[in-house]
Image (tube, helix red, strand yellow):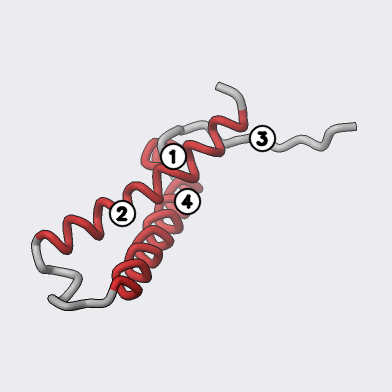
Amino acid sequence: MNDTMVSIIRTYVPIAVGFVLTWIGDALDIIIPDGADQQLIMGLTAVITAVYYGLVRMLERKWPWFGIFLGARAQPEYTKKT
């Protein structure tokens, strides 16, 4: 798989996870109170996504196999074109 595809996967998987976790929290009435504004829901989704991504990246530095939780274990390698 080329580096562009790896970077796209590793970007969109955390976004999907943040969305799903927020949706589950809403369905279970755990995270989002009734009558919450859409802005609050979008903000919570962004925060959950950022926390998930940051946590997985930190764990991936110690244990590289954690990269699977970003959709791909491989990290893109950016090289300077000459």
For residue 77, which numbered disc appears in the image?
Answer: 3
Identify the secondary structure beneath mark 1: helix
Answer yes or no: do the residues labelled 4 and 3 have beta carbons within 8 Å?
no
Indicate left or right for 8 with 46 as reference. Answer: right
Q: Quadrant of the C terminus?
A: top right
Identify the secondary structure beneath mark 4: helix
Callout 2 amino acid: Phe
> Which of these two is toward me, 57 or 43?
43
Identify the secondary structure beneath mark 2: helix
Q: Along the polypeptide, which appears first: circle 3 or circle 1? A: 1
* Residue at mark 4: 57
Q: Quadrant of residue 80?
A: top right
* Residue at mark 2: 19
The x and y percentages for residue 16 are 35, 47
What is the CA distance from the residue labelled 2 to the residue labelled 1? 19 Å
* Residue at mark 1: 67
Answer yes or no: do the residues labelled 4 and 2 have beta carbons within 8 Å?
no
Mark 3 crowdedness (10 Å alpha carbons): few <14, some 14-19, many ≥20: few
